[in-house]
Amino acid sequence: MADALSLFLEPNAECVALSVATPTWTQAVADSYLEDPVAQDMITKLAVDPADVHHFSLRDGLLRFKGRLWVGNTPALHQQLLATVHSSPIHGHSGIPVTLRRVKQLFA
């Protein structure tokens, strides 16, 4: 059985489907905002006037500060994210300075 990519497409055919991988911890980050008054305040301000909050944005339910994912004040989640970055198969058990640099690049 042929898959969609190996089928012959007409010259004017369009691709109408797109798959996106979403890490499972993104929901935990969004949930961290529920108990964080600073995050709640920021989300409210962004909903009223996005231009009023400099360097912050809200996309797909996730706050971003200067393009980096903003994590609510949840120490358990902070530890989970550190462990995830440290143990990532892509980067593999880096030391403290490298792990910290990676975390700072991804999260605010």
Image (tube, helix red, strand yellow):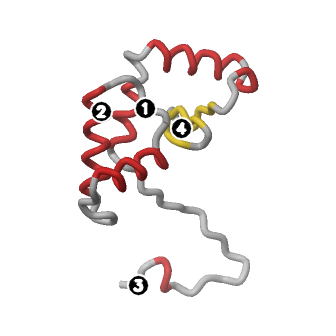
Mark 4: amino acid: Asp
Q: Closer to the N terminus: mark 4 or mark 1? A: 4
Distance of label 3 from label 1 (alpha carbons): 43 Å
Of the two numbered discs 4 and 1 in the rendering, the one whose residue sits closer to the viewer = 1
* In-front residue for pair 61/57: 57
What residue appears at the point 49 percent right and 20 percent down from the top-left corner? 39
Is 27 located above or below residue 53 in the figure? below
* Numbered label attached to residue 2: 3
Tag 4 secondary structure: loop
* Numbered label attached to residue 77: 2
Mark 3: amino acid: Ala
In the image, taking residue 60 as reference, residue 100 lies left or right, namely left
* Numbered label attached to residue 60: 4
**Residues at marks 1 and 2 touching, judged by CB atoms closer than 8 Å:** yes
Q: Which residue is mark 1?
A: 71
Q: Quadrant of residue 56?
A: top right
Percent across and percent down for residue 72 are 41, 26
Of the two numbered discs 3 and 1 in the rendering, the one whose residue sits closer to the viewer = 1
Percent across and percent down for residue 100 are 37, 47
Q: Closer to the N terminus: mark 1 or mark 2? A: 1
Q: Closer to the N terminus: mark 3 or mark 1? A: 3
Quadrant (top left/top right/bottom left/bottom right) for the N terminus:
bottom left
Q: Closer to the N terminus: mark 2 or mark 3? A: 3
Mark 2: amino acid: Leu
Q: Closer to the N terminus: mark 4 or mark 2? A: 4
Tag 3 secondary structure: loop
Is 56 located above or below residue 43 in the figure? below
* Residues packed near mark 4 inside 10 Å, few (<14), some (14 to 19) or many (20 plus): few
